[in-house]
Amino acid sequence: MLEAYDFVSKKLPVSIRLTDEQKNELLPLVKGIAGSELGSMIASTPIDGQKREYEFSTRIDGVQCIARIDLALRLSEKEWSVVDYKSGKKSEWSLELYKNQVGYYAVLLSYANKVNVPKCAIVYAGTSVSQPEWFEPKITLSNVREAITQIEAGNFKPEADRRCIACPYSGSGGGRWVCKFGWNFVNGNVRRKKKRSKVAREP
Ligand code: SF4
């Protein structure tokens, strides 16, 4: 919902209907963002400089790289910002993970459009006061190129841990069932939890 919300007109597209419960959830979030630096940036950006749910791909060293950006904001002719909305609550480990993801989007946006992306924001929608987490992206084009080279050479060692729970490739949350390491980790945790709750119910 946040991806579609227009902070300038303060409206959702008419195609989106919300229940009263959803409205009650959305309102504090919208107020939090509207009162923040991000809210001012959105409000002062012309509508053609706000790309919502912006999906594009670009080729780096012959490899198709895809980005799905919740909100890309044009700050000036050559300067953009990337904003990503997350449904959960903030945690240190997830923030580090998401900074990499958003940093990767920033690299692709810079590379594809020949612009700079000096700062990005992550907004946790599961946090009651949704002040954005601003950061300077640390991922560089060289990092992406190096990752492509290593992946193509088969030189990567997946390390399944709790970050897999948020990874779309693990199949969690209806995502893509691509990574067997993540799937085994997530599924193993679910099985352990079920077993624990069964034991807890026994008299
Ligand atoms: S699911 Fe796979 S690709 Fe995703 S974080 Fe876990 S090991 Fe890495």
Image: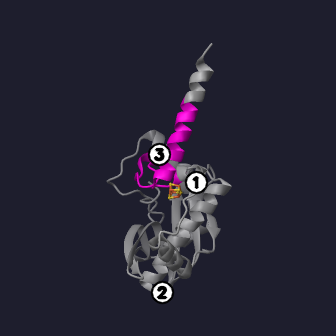
Q: Residues within 10 Å of mark 1 (few under 14, many from 20)?
A: some
- Residue 23 is left or right of residue 132, and the answer is left
Q: Secondary structure at mark 2?
A: loop
Q: Disc 1 marks which residue?
A: 163
Instruction: Name the quadrant containing residue 19.
Output: top left
Q: Is residue 74 visible?
A: no
Relative vertical location of residue 53 with respect to residue 87 in this rendering, above or below: below
Mark 2: C-beta under 8 Å from nearest atom of ligand 1: no
Instruction: Name the quadrant containing residue 202.
Output: top right
| Residue drawn at x 60%, y 50% as measured from the top left | 89
- Residue 159 is left or right of residue 70, and the answer is right
Q: CA distance from mark 2 to mark 3?
A: 35 Å
Q: Quadrant of the N terminus?
A: bottom left
Q: CA distance from mark 2 to mark 1?
A: 36 Å
Asked if residue 186 lies in the magenta stretch, the reply is yes
Relative vertical location of residue 70 with respect to residue 179 in this rendering, above or below: below
Amino acid type for the residue under numbered disc 2: Glu
Q: Disc 2 marks which residue?
A: 77
Q: Nearer the viewer, residue 49 or 69?
A: 69
Contact (Cβ within 8 Å) of mark 1 with mark 3: no
Q: Position of residue 57 (x, y in %)?
A: 37, 74
| Residue drawn at x 47%, y 75% as measured from the top left | 148
User: What number of labels is visible?
Assistant: 3
Q: Is residue 179 visible?
A: yes
The furthest residue to the left: 15
Residue 23, label in figure: 3
Mark 1: C-beta under 8 Å from nearest atom of ligand 1: yes
Q: Which residues are magenta?
A: 166-194
Q: Secondary structure at mark 1?
A: helix
Q: Position of residue 120 (x, y in %)?
A: 57, 71
